Image (cartoon, rainbow, N blue to C red):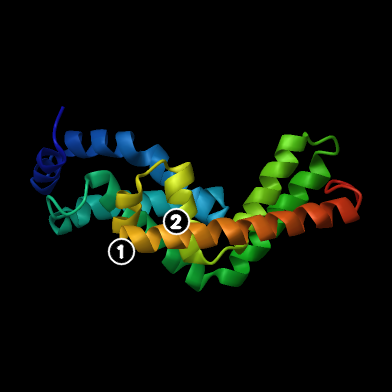
Amino acid sequence: MLTDEDIMVAIVAGDQRVYADTVRRHARPIAIYAYRMLGSESEAEDIAQETFLRLWTQATRWQPGKAALSTWLHRIAHNLCIDFMRKNKAALANELSDDLVGDQMSAEAMLDNNIEYNKLQVALGRLPERQRSALVLTHYQGLSNKEVAGILEVSVEALESLLARARRTLKIYWQAASQSAAASGGSHEQ
C-alpha cells in the first residue's frame, strides 16, 4: 500500500492510475460529507468532483507531515461547501425545504425513522456552518478531533468547545422540530 506521500508524488508526476485509485478510495466519504453539509445530492456531487479536480491540479500544495491526504481532501471539500453555502444561502434553504415537503407529500405512510432523519437534517441545516462542519466531520465522517481541528484550522481545545456548542444548539433545534411536528399532528399530515 502506498503512503500518502507516495500517492501525492505519483499524482504530481501525472500518474493517472494512482489518481483514479485515490479518487475511488476517497470519493464516497467526500460526497457524504458534502451532502451532509449541503443537503443536496446534486450539489454534493459537484463539490466532490471539484475536490478531486483540485487534487489533480493542486497536488503540489499538499504538505507531507502537515495533514493526512484524507484530511487535506476533507479540507478542500469543506472550503468548497462553505463557499457554496455563502453564495447560495437562500437557494439552499429553499431546496432543502422543498425536498423535505416533497418527500413528505409523496410518502403518506413515511416511517418514523425517515421523519426523524428529516428533522435531524433540518436541525443540522440550521446550525452555524462551523458547528455543522465540526459535528458532521466528527460524528458522521468518523474523523478524529485532531483531524477535524486541522480541517477547520482550530486547536483541538477550540474544536471541543465548538462541538459542545453544536450539540447544545442541535438539541434545541431538535426539540423545536419535535414540538412543531407534534403541534401539527405529525410531520406528514397536511
Q: Position of residue 185 (x, y in %)?
A: 91, 49
SS for dot 1:
loop
Q: Residue at x 71, y 36 (%)?
A: 113
Please identify the quarter of the rendering in which residue 18 is found. top left
Q: Which residue is drawn at 47% across and 57% down?
A: 163
Give the residue furthest to the top: 1
User: What whole-number distance in Å separates the C-alpha atoms at marks 2 and 1?
Assistant: 11 Å
Q: Which of marks 2 and 1 is nearer the N terminus?
A: 2
Q: Residue 153 carries which label?
A: 1
Please identify the quarter of the rendering in which residue 16 is found. top left
Can the viewer see residue 32?
A: no
Instruction: Specify the amino acid type for callout 2.
Output: Ala
Q: Residue at x 13, y 55 (%)?
A: 63
Q: Position of residue 162 (x, y in %)?
A: 45, 62
As drawn, is 165 to the left or to the right of 184?
left
Can the viewer see residue 177?
A: yes
Between 149 and 117, the one lying in front of the other is 149
Q: Position of residue 19 (x, y in %)?
A: 21, 40
Instruction: Specify the amino acid type for callout 1.
Output: Glu
As drawn, is 145 to the left or to the right of 3?
right
Which residue is label 2 attached to?
A: 134
- Mark 1 surroundings: few (<14), some (14-19) or many (≥20) residues within 10 A: few
- Mark 2 surroundings: few (<14), some (14-19) or many (≥20) residues within 10 A: many
Between 155 and 4, the one lying in front of the other is 155
